[in-house]
Image (cartoon, helix red, strand yellow):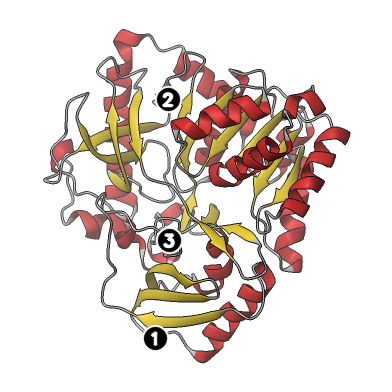
Amino acid sequence: MHLFYIALQLNGFPIKKAKTYFEKLQEIPEQDFENYVIQKKEEIVNYHINNNPSYQEFMGKSEFENWNDLPIMTKKDFQKPLLDRLSKEYKQKYYCNKTSGSSGDPFIFAKDKYCHALTWATIINRYGWFGIDINTSLQARFYGIPLDFIGNKKERIKDFLSHRFRFPIFDLSDEFLESVVLKFKRKKFDYINGYTSSIVLFAKFLQRKNIILNSVCPSLKCCIVTSEMLFEEDKILLEKQFGVPIINEYGASELDLIAFQNTNNELQVNSETLFVEILDEENNVLPYGKEGRIVITSLYNKAHPFIRYDIGDIGILDEKSTFKKPILKKLIGRSSDFVLLPSGKKSPGLTFYYITKSIIEEDGNVKEFVIKQTKIDTFEVEYVSEIMLTDIQIDTINKAIVKYLEGGLLFSFNKKEKLERGKSGKLKQFISMLK
């Protein structure tokens, strides 16, 4: 067993068992797959009705009769302490993490360890479509990273075990991107993975410098973009400047890998561990080909219910979709502006996840937040909470701003009853009002 698999096993994630089970799921014939999905839907709902007091209260009744009558869960339903949301037998045995808050609704979530191992089994399978081996393929990772000592070291250890080299995306100046190119010349990267906007900015830098990336790094096989929208014109730019296939990944940390571009250039939904529906504003299920809200059920997470969970995005399932192979024809959302700073430095809007994570506490006080850049050095933070942020919390955020961005920036904090939403109903965490 390779180092990454060993690390998962030692941390209580049964990856070998999960991989074997996942492969069996893929062997289910098309004609039997609908029955598999129906069975797993019923099992996970009944489990949480019988074992999760929080879901029992949310349901308002103790019996499950009709799937379409189940209430829709949203991020707001998770704005309470995590321990109050866990199933009885998983109060101490679970994987825990925070969402990025890119939608404006940050929260802490949990998965049981087998469910999280299945997530890795899904990723391993999909990456394998393009010749990527999680254990041996070297990844160039364009992601954020905590700057505090302990958080930073933890991520660096994860990077080592996962065979990846991280390029932190808080400073995307030309000087930094020059150093990135030098690293690609010296290391035999197999693939790129990271935030769409940061990778697109790197491609624009390569375009200005007249550099094709796989000419300086011939080992490069593909580029996987995630966390934000991939627009067609950006995909064309990436293909041209990187010289390798560009693969679109759609996921959510609290759920799983939701959809992954297959070798036929289709965004194939993960039907093995998730059930994806498209609903209208009245929560009616829409037929294939109709645009609506993306609502997802995690079929294996027993620690924490994600049942008919409205993720906050809009999409369309292709008319040719089947239960075994749903295709996401259209996806709306997950784009992020860049922060422009007086020094000339650029940083993606997702940087504010690392800045504001200090106030995303388990008590669920901060419900939503949006950061608006009104001038080159001036920002407004609007947030919804039970209690106003304290001077100590604001001071913590201001210190994080200096650490992740730069000093001399002006921030105002405004508590609101509610925040203004876009057309899709989704909050954008960062909004630039600069021209």
Say whether disc 2 or disc 3 marks the residue closer to the N-terminus: 2
Q: Amino acid at mark 1?
A: Met
Q: How far apart in space, not on screen, are marks 3 and 1 (Cα)?
A: 19 Å
Residue at 17% x, 46% y: name it: 63
Q: Amino acid at mark 2?
A: Leu
Residue 380 location (% of width, % of height): 43, 76
Callout 1 secondary element: loop
Furthest residue in direction bottom, as rendered: 391
Residue 219 position (above or below residue 386)? above
Which of 396 and 337 lies nearest the eye of the viewer? 337
Q: Which mark is residue 267?
A: 2
Residue 6 position (above or below residue 29)? below
Task: Look at the image and tell me whether residue 98 can be seen.
Answer: yes
Q: For the residues carrying marks 3 and 1, which lies nearer the camera in this image?
A: 3
Furthest residue in direction right, as rendered: 186
Q: For the residues carrying marks 2 and 3, which lies nearer the camera in this image?
A: 3
Q: Amino acid at mark 3?
A: Gln
Name the quadrant of the N terminus: top right
Q: How far apart in space, not on screen, are marks 1 and 2 (Cα)?
A: 42 Å
Report the label total: 3
Residue at 51% x, 34% y: name it: 234
Instruction: Say whether marks 1 and 2 touch (CB < 8 Å).
Output: no
Residue ID for mark 3: 429
Callout 2 secondary element: strand
Image quadrant of residue 171? bottom right
Residue ID for mark 1: 388
Residue 323 location (% of width, % of height): 30, 19
Side of 415 relative to 342 (left or right) = left
